[in-house]
Image: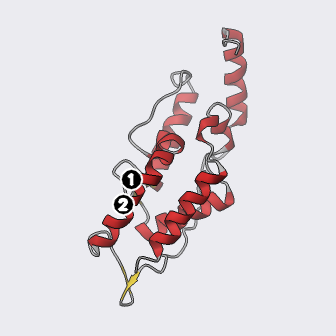
Amino acid sequence: MKNFTSNNRMWALLFILLSFPISTDAHEKHHAKPLPMENKGEAISPHEGNQVWTTINNRYQKEIRPIFQRACFNCHSSETEYPWYYHVPGIKQFIDHDIREAKEHIDMSDNFPFKGHGNPEEDLEGIKQTILKNTMPPSYYMILHWESKLTEEEKQKIIRWIEESTKLR
């Protein structure tokens, strides 16, 4: 494969800048209603039903986290690996904004349940809908990060984990 020359890098950066949407808000504005993870009619909080969250988290760490580490952690965790073009003025601000917004939405740094502005049920449903609608990663991110795209097998594995997790109660 041919190495990038400075001229090729300039064209790649120009392409990236032109590919950014006017709004970099990659997630949907409205969150889904909580999933039916209920205990006698009440939703289970992360602090209650510890066994449920432990069971879900154990499977997450074993089967799903490796997928998310490759495909999602650059924006949705504290394990960001910045690309070679990160320090280019303008691009740095876009990247910082996207990472900050991504982590506010869902932060996968500390396993399941995730941190963010949703509850665990909303997070699971949000991940499922994101996969079904194919809205992550954003197309402008995939231009230089093809490895972040989920395979069909990975998508099915994540959806199975979500569906089986919601049936634990």
Q: Position of residue 140 (x, y in %)?
A: 67, 38
Q: Relative to residue 57, is residue 85 depicted above or below?
A: above
Q: Residue at x 31, y 65 (%)?
A: 54
Q: Position of residue 150 (x, y in %)?
A: 61, 47
Q: Position of residue 109 (x, y in %)?
A: 37, 47
Residue type at mark 2: give it.
Answer: Asn
Mark 2 and mark 1 in contact? Answer it, CB < 8 Å. Answer: yes
Q: Secondary structure at mark 2?
A: helix
User: What is the crowding at mark 1: few (fewer than 14 residues within 10 Å), some, or many (at least 20)?
Assistant: some
Q: Relative to residue 159, is residue 94 depicted above or below?
A: above
Residue tagged 1: 61
Residue tagged 2: 57
Q: Please give left or right for residue 126 compared with residue 100 in the image.
A: right
Q: Please give left or right for residue 19 compared with residue 92 in the image.
A: right
Q: Residue at x 33, y 72 (%)?
A: 52
Examine the image and state in which quarter residue 10 appears. top right
Examine the image and state in which quarter residue 9 appears. top right
Spatial CA distance of label 2 from label 1 is 6 Å
Q: Secondary structure at mark 1?
A: helix
Residue farthest to the bottom? 40
Quadrant of the snapshot with the C terminus: bottom left
Give whichever of 99, 54 is nearer the camera: 54
Q: Residue at x 49, y 47 (%)?
A: 68
Q: Relative to residue 18, is residue 131 depicted above or below?
A: below
Residue type at mark 1: give it.
Answer: Gln
User: What is the crowding at mark 2: few (fewer than 14 residues within 10 Å), some, or many (at least 20)?
Assistant: some
Q: Is residue 119 visible?
A: no
Count of labels in the image = 2
Give whichever of 144, 26 is nearer the camera: 144
Q: Is residue 46 visible?
A: yes
The tag on residue 49 is none
Quadrant of the snapshot with the N terminus: top right
